[in-house]
Amino acid sequence: MITATRTRASHRRSTVAQACSSSSPTVVVAGGGIVGVSTAFFLAAEQTNLRPVVIDATSVAASASGKAGGFLAASWSDGSATEELARKGFALHQSWSETDTFGDVDYRFNIDAESGLLGSSERRCIGSTRRACGQVHPRKLTTRLAEQVVAMGGEVRAQTMLVGVVLEDDVEQVDRKRVVGVRVRKTDDENAAEETIATNKVVLALGAWTSVTLKTACSAAYAAVGTEVAGHKVHSLVVADTREEGLDGPESTSLFLRDMTVSRGADPEAYPRPDGTIYVCGNQAGAVYDEIPPRLASEIGVEEDGAAGYLRQVSAVLVGGEAEDVDVMEAQACYLPTSSSNRPLISAVPNIDGLYVNAGHSCWGILQGPISGKAIAELVATGVY
């Protein structure tokens, strides 16, 4: 069971007063996205007998966690397997927003979410309660969590790829193995030799790279996990919000739209941000991309003539004017980690002591990532969650 979130005061104590010791046993967390750094954050803040070392083949927030919209909703998963994860994840974000530690990551709550046709002013509120959603800037939050990990005595290593998980047979149980280390290699130096980090606890939070990495880094774990975590490529733009402000200030309503002007339809989404921009996402209708991401997040390309071009047209409808006049501040693409079970994989790997997986949160990674990081940190430290 995922434990309840703590109070504002206790969060401040955990991020300032407590810190893991440099002599504490090392836990390697593979993946510098929101799930990985949240796991490391809670290991450093609440399990001070363990020292997290985060490794990422590119950098912190290099893929979905740096290019997501950051939309938060407590009740949209009600009735599903992730209801508790979503509700406690939302509460955790609310508690973080009240602390000095996360005071400048663009948290915003009590905002509306509406649906309607693109270009139409007729929209309806999503859900039974208005102003029940929230928002955060994913890249700022993920980066801040990584900074806190380092401040509390942990380590974050960029350009460091997981090559292999080193296993030994369990001498007491012949059908089990145990983790004794990981092999890593620098990705910014093609001549660099492999390095082995000694550890008996490893958390794989590799997002869309989870299954493809498991196949080569630890085939025994890949077979034991069973659930496949692959990728779904999604494009997004960050554009200047040139709309006139209303009586209550800048518009904050998140939009989930339907575009019937293109063949087969499309479902773009738009999230106005407090920094004067709008995040617009969604693929051009019918567009299909490779489910296997490239080796590095930095190698993910933007389909300029497809999704990015389409989103420029969507943005023009939202802010008014022509597509060529839209002020595009960022054009980007990432792979959302999708699970074959349609739910996140937050678990110890069967029959391999010391190996854990935390991945597959799809479009709800920012909402559910921190609370699942808390849960897996408890599992690593205590054996239960």
Image (spheres, helix red, strand yellow):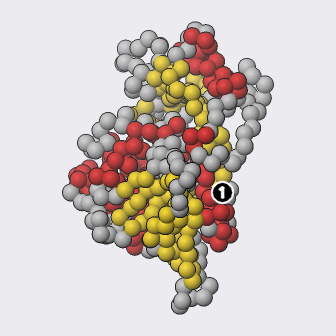
**Neighbour class for label 1 at 10 Å: few (<14), some, many (≥20)?**
some
Q: In terms of image quadrants, where is residue 284?
A: top right
Q: Residue at x 65, y 63 (%)?
A: 216
Q: Residue at x 41, y 60 (%)?
A: 53
On the question of residue 303 being in view, the answer is yes
Lateral position of residue 365 relative to residue 54, left or right: right
Query: In x, y percent, where is residue 152?
Result: 29, 56
What residue is shown with label 1? 212
Q: In terms of image quadrants, where is residue 100?
A: top left
Q: In terms of image quadrants, where is residue 39?
A: bottom left
Residue closest to the far bottom:
172
Query: Quick check: 321 above or below 187?
Result: above
Residue type beneath disc 1: Val
Q: Quadrant of the C terminus?
A: bottom left
Query: In x, y percent, where is residue 96?
Result: 33, 46
Along the line of sight, the residue nearer the viewer: 84 or 168: 168
Query: In x, y percent, where is residue 68?
Result: 52, 38
Count the labels in the image: 1
Query: Quick check: 45 above or below 355?
Result: above
Query: In x, y percent, where is residue 10?
Result: 25, 55
Q: Residue at x 32, y 36 (%)?
A: 104
Along the line of sight, the residue nearer the viewer: 187 or 379: 187
Residue closest to the far front:
191
On the question of residue 83 being in view, the answer is no
Along the line of sight, the residue nearer the viewer: 28 or 65: 28
Residue closest to the far left:
17
Q: Residue at x 53, y 62 (%)?
A: 194
Q: Secondary structure at mark 1?
A: helix
